[in-house]
């Protein structure tokens, strides 16, 4: 019985210490989901704008940026008309979107 209690406590301690590691990593998510259009480290490309120094990211709320990620921007909604394609909807969960928005805000400073 003591063995199960000790194993349970060890498992609980491992979860408590690894919880921050389980938090979404905005840079890693960006690299896999966004960098093909927005370039490595948000530097931009011929397909999509850069996030470094981006005035929209700097001045917009996290909620507004999250809405663009969730819903995309196409047609008349496109902000950056010089790019041939619009922003497609992304299928990320709320924690992933929050992590990406935090990363974008960091780059935009």
Image (cartoon, rainbow, N blue to C red):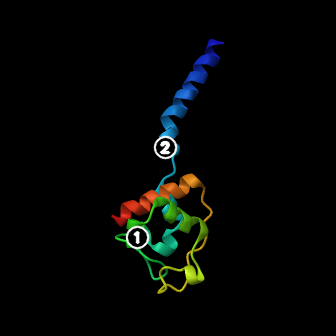
Crowd around label 2: few <14 · some 14–19 · many ≥20 (10 Å): few
Viewport quadrant of the C terminus: bottom left
Residue 27 is at least partly visible in this image? no
Label at residue 73: none
Residue 32: percent from left, percent from top:
53, 64
Name above or below for residue 23 compared with residue 12.
below
Residue 81: percent from left, percent from top:
49, 85
Q: Say which element carries label 1.
A: loop
Q: Is residue 100 left or right of residue 106?
A: right
Label at residue 51: 1
N-terminal label among 2 and 1: 2
Residue 62 is at least partly visible in this image? yes
Q: Nearer the viewer, mark 2 or mark 1?
A: 1
* Residue on which the image places disc 2: 21
Viewport quadrant of the N terminus: top right
Q: Nearer the viewer, residue 10 or 104?
A: 104
Q: Say which element carries label 2.
A: helix
Residue drawn at (62%, 16%) of the image: 3
Extreme-right residue of the structure: 1
Q: Is residue 7 left or right of residue 62?
A: right
Crowd around label 1: few <14 · some 14–19 · many ≥20 (10 Å): many
Q: Nearer the viewer, residue 46 or 70?
A: 70
Residue 74: percent from left, percent from top:
59, 79
Name above or below for residue 103 compared with residue 72.
above
Hey, which quadrant is residue 27 in on the image?
bottom left
Name above or below for residue 50 compared with residue 30.
below
Residue 14: percent from left, percent from top:
53, 31
Residue drawn at (60%, 69%) of the image: 71
Q: Is residue 99 left or right of residue 74?
A: left
Q: Is residue 1 left or right of residue 107?
A: right
């Amino acid at each position: 019985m003591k063995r199960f209690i000790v194993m349970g406590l060890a498992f609980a301690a491992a979860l408590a210490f690894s919880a921050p590691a389980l938090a979404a990593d905005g840079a890693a998510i960006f690299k896999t989901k966004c960098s093909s259009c927005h370039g490595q480290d948000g530097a931009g490309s011929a397909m999509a704008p850069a996030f470094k120094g981006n005035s929209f990211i700097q001045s917009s709320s996290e909620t507004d940026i999250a809405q663009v990620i969730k819903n995309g921007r196409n047609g008349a909604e496109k902000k950056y008309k010089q790019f041939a394609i619009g922003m497609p909807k992304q299928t990320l969960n709320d924690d992933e979107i929050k992590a990406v928005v935090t990363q974008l805000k960091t780059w935009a400073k």
